[in-house]
Image (spheres, coloured by chain):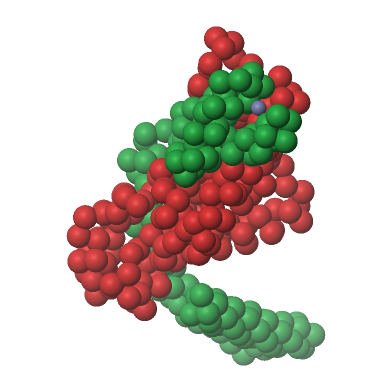
Amino acid sequence: MKKLEDENKIIERVKRGDKKAFEPIVKFYMKRAYNIALGFVHNEQDALDISQEAFIKAFRGLKKFDTKKDFFPYFYQIIKRLCFDYTKKKKREGFKTNNFFNVVYNPNGNNRFKEALSEAINKLEPEQKELIILRYIEGFSYEELSRLLGKPIGTIMSSLFYIKKKLKEELEGGV
Amino acid sequence: MNSEHKKIKALLLPYLEGKLEEEERRKVEEHLKVCKECREEIKKYENIEEGLKMMKLKQPSEEVWDNYWSSVYNRLERKIGWIFFSIGAIILLFFGVYQFIDELIKDPTTPLVVKIGILLLSFGGVVLFVSILREQLFSKKRERYEEVEK
Ligand SMILES: [Zn+2]
């Protein structure tokens, strides 16, 4: 898992109330935060907004943070919770999903494959999208995913296999 | 052959990721030589894998990223700013309203009905204010509790 250099030292400083010291942390994790939020909320503007809110919450909670631990797993819990609150609220209002996945791979020289695949990904369940984003956009290994999500490696692996099978079936039905 | 085919088909994904034991891996390779269907299946999975690897998510403009930190920083500051601003505003508001009411009530030309109306109005206002304040404080406390709970 890519981690910021000297992260623990920086967090020590933030814990002492140095707001400006938080800058490298935010800059290092902002894109990851946005991608993760996008996977849950399906809306660019709201994903951006939630990611910022998560940093503010994380900042306020840092006082009680154990500096021996990594920042990201802590942050991940915060942002995921904000996303769940958001989707719960949105579901009551009628939640519409827009496709934010952009597959550029084009094996047969026509655009059908990439369009069909990005549509198929968009149809996945939220936890499946979460896994896809963490694995393929953020490049987490099975082991890192297992630690982050608190599930055995075997479960993570078979979930990903299941997702790919589902994608394949979706493609066979559609193309 | 057919049951072998089914067994191998289920192993294709782990095979592609190099997660099979030597013996199973060899079995899959042997089968692939003779089974066109499984070869096509593997091709499909490879395409999906490649597609996923090259997938991108819609991103905001570079400008948004350039301003991201200052926007977070401002929001952090703003929270503190808001607290001071609200306290100040409340003090001024109360003082202004108090003076206004005081003047009207002391003025002998103000009709009695208006005086009673003003008293009821300001009493209601105070009750409302306290109730909103209590609700705010309560929800803050609960929020903090939820954070600890995590
Ligand atoms: Zn076969």
How many numbered markers are drawn? 0
Q: Nearer the viewer, residue A73 or B86?
A: A73
Query: Residue at left 46%, top 28%?
Result: B54
Colour used to depict chain A in the structure image: red
Q: Which of A56 and B59 is in front in this view?
A: B59
* Residue B122 seen from this side: no
* Residue B150 seen from this side: yes
Query: Is A1 located above or below residue B97 in the figure?
Result: above
Q: Answer with the quarter of the image where residue A147 lies.
A: bottom left
Q: Which of B124 and A47 is in front in this view?
A: A47
Query: Is B136 located above or below residue B7 in the figure?
Result: below
Query: Residue at left 71%, top 84%?
Result: B124
Q: In which quarter of the image is ligand 1?
A: top right
Q: Which of B98 and B140 is in front in this view?
A: B140
Q: Is A71 on the left-hand or right-hand side of B29?
A: left
Query: Is A139 located above or below residue B46 in the figure?
Result: below
Q: Residue furthest right?
A: B113
Query: Is B61 located above or below residue B75 in the figure?
Result: above
- The quarter in which the C terminus of chain A is drawn is top right
Percent from the top left, x then y, of residue B67? 35, 44
Query: Residue at left 63%, top 21%?
Result: B35
Percent from the top left, x then y, of residue A157? 53, 49
Q: Is B73 on the left-hand or right-hand side of A42?
A: left
Percent from the top left, x then y, of residue B101? 61, 83
Colour used to depict chain B in the structure image: green
Query: Residue at left 74%, top 86%?
Result: B120
